[in-house]
Amino acid sequence: MFAMIADWQQSGLSKKRYCEENGINEATFYYWFSRGKENDTSSGGFIAMDKTGRKGDVEVIYPNGVRIKVDTDLGLLSQLIRLY
């Protein structure tokens, strides 16, 4: 879905026109677009995480201001990120 959003942005077409030309349900496209905006970071990409055994706390900050500090357990971090 993110690849389609990027393709639309480069196409110069309106969202409606892009959906018509690519056989995409317009409501679905708008949903993808809104999800992409929620997941967008200031850098515009993913953040690399080193999976080696370094110890330390990681702080998860949700858009509503809630902050949670946890150990660098990637499974727990993944679950916390999906909560929002």
Image (cartoon, grey):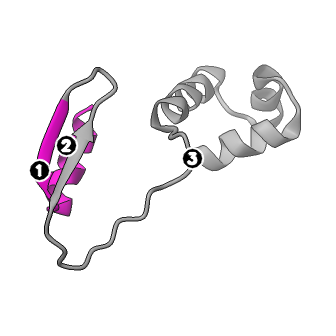
Q: Are marks 1 and 2 in contact (CB under 8 Å)?
A: yes
CA–CA distance in space, label 3 to label 2: 21 Å
Which residue position is annotated with label 2?
80
* SS at badge 1: strand
Mark 3 and mark 2 lie on one chain; the one further toward the N terminus is 3
Determine if the magenta segment contains residue 47: no
**Part of the protein shown in magenta:** 67-84
Q: Is residue 82 magenta?
A: yes
The quarter of the rendered structure image containing the C terminus is top left
Disc 2 on helix, strand or loop? helix
- Left or right: where does residue 27 sit relative to residue 14? left
Which residue is rendered at x = 77% and y = 21% of the image?
Answer: 16
Q: Nearer the viewer, residue 74 or 8?
A: 74
- The kind of residue tagged 3 is Ser
> What is the tally of numbered marks visible in this picture?
3
Q: Residue at x 86, y 39 (%)?
A: 11
Pick whichever, 54 or 37, lies toward us.
Answer: 54
Of labels 3 and 2, the one closer to you: 3
Vertical position of residue 78 compared to residue 80: above or below = below
Label 3: state its secondary structure.
loop
Hey, which quadrant is residue 33 in on the image? Answer: top right
The picture places residue 66, in percent across and down from the top left corner, at 20, 26
Q: Which mark is residue 70?
A: 1
Q: Which residue is mark 3?
A: 43
Separation of disc 1 and disc 3 at Cα?
23 Å
